[in-house]
Image (tube, rainbow, N blue to C red):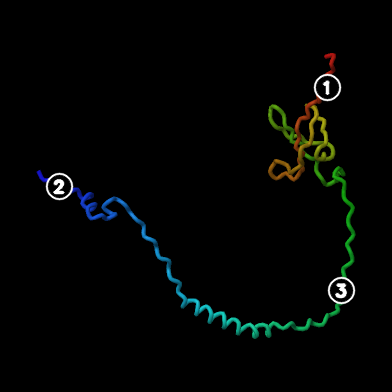
Amino acid sequence: MAKRPNPASAGSRDGSAKARGMWFRRRRRQAQLDLSALDGLADLVERIVALLPEQSARRKPQPPPEPVQVEVRLPAPKPVPEPVPERAERADEPAPLLFVASASGYRLVESDGPAPSRGDRVELADGSFRVLRLGPSPLPGDSRRCAFLEREEPSAEPRTPDG
């Protein structure tokens, strides 16, 4: 039987590198610079340099304008009104509402006295409350102020070593 020549080994007889499975990378040639673009750039630079003296002549500093003297009269200062204390009750101001938070829910209470300030302590039949914030009434169309209260827990007395 005749022996068939192997295609991979067939090239080995002629000694080619491809037949032996060896691959070589070709070196890429660097791109040649197009120097014609530089000529156009040089022309542009020459034009700019030629325009520079014209531009500097246009930018000559001009003398400042003569100062104008004008007499300005300021209006007399308005008197500052004295600040009204927050606690001062006005005759036209309606009694404020108290928005009281409790474990069973919220309730609105009409206050008899002046509106409390933020951080004040308010005593009610349920106990002692602290004013968290002041705001408008939660009722629609009501123009009264409302103090939002939170129950103030009694402070626990510090324990002594005796018990």
Q: Is residue 20 above or below residue 109?
A: below
- The disc placed on residue 158 is 1
Q: Is residue 132 above or below residue 16?
A: above
Q: Is tag 3's residue or tag 1's residue first in the polypeptide sequence?
A: 3
Q: Is residue 82 left or right of residue 42?
A: right
Please state the horizontal and vertical placement of residue 57, each as a whole percent of the image.
Answer: 68, 85
Disc 2 secondary structure class: loop
Q: Amino acid at mark 3?
A: Val
Q: Badge 2 local density, few (<14 within 10 Å), some, or many (20+)?
A: few
Specify the label residue 43 is tagged with: none
- Indicate left or right for 67 with 7 as reference: right
Query: Residue 142 at x, y = what percent?
Result: 72, 44
Residue located at (81% from left, 37% from top): 119
Mark number displayed over residue 4: 2
| Residue toward you, 145 or 19 | 19
Quadrant in the picture for the C terminus: top right
Tag 3 secondary structure: loop
The CA span between labels 3 and 1 is: 70 Å
Q: Amino acid at mark 1?
A: Pro
User: Which residue is found at the position 87% from the left and 46% from the top?
Assistant: 85
Q: Residue at x 87, y 44 (%)?
A: 88
Q: Residue furthest left?
A: 1
Q: Position of residue 6 (x, y in %)?
A: 19, 48
Residues at circles 2 and 3 in contact by the CB criterion of under 8 Å: no
Find residue 72 and report its image quarter: bottom right
Q: CA distance from mark 2 to mark 3?
A: 116 Å
What residue is disc 3 on?
A: 72
Q: For the residue carrying disc 1, how many other residues have a C-alpha within 10 Å: few (<14), some (14-19), or many (20+)?
A: few
Secondary element at image label 1: loop
Image quadrant where residue 54 sits: bottom right
The CA distance from mark 2 to mark 1 is 108 Å
